[in-house]
Image (cartoon, helix red, strand yellow):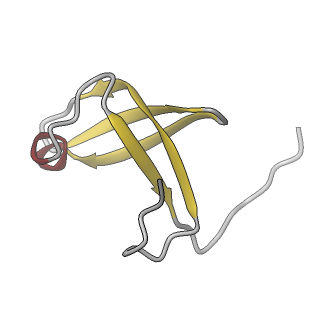
Amino acid sequence: MSIQAINVRNQFKGKVREIIRGDVVSEIDVETPWGIVTSVITTRSVDDLQLKVGSDVVALVKSTEVSIAKL
């Protein structure tokens, strides 16, 4: 599944693994075949999207800069 109306190349289909709710923002962990993707979104958006643990979602990753650190 691909979201065509949004210009984002990196789309990771997965399931919500954990939601850490805050008063204003919440942390959403999405389990994908490539690992965990974490997003911080407004708690209002969590409610509007009716996100729950186990919900099928697509994580859309868009960045203007990616930093690399050697381990």
29 or 33, which is in the foreground? 33
Whether 36 is drawn above or below 58: the answer is above
Task: Residue 17 in the image: state x and y as whole percent.
Answer: 41, 23
Q: Is residue 19 above or below residue 49?
A: above
Who is closer to the viewer here, 59 or 41? 59
Q: Residue at x 15, y 44 (%)?
A: 24
- Specify the farthest residue to the right: 70
Q: Position of residue 40 (x, y in %)?
A: 35, 46
Q: How many marks?
A: 0
Q: Is residue 55 above or below residue 45?
A: above
User: Residue 62, position in %: x, y?
Assistant: 52, 66
Compared across the picture, whether 44 is left or right of 69 comes to left
- Look at 29% across and 26% down and name the residue there: 20
Report whether 8 appears left or right of 39: right
Identify the residue shown where x is 33% and y is 23%: 54
The residue closer to the viewer here, 65 or 55, is 55
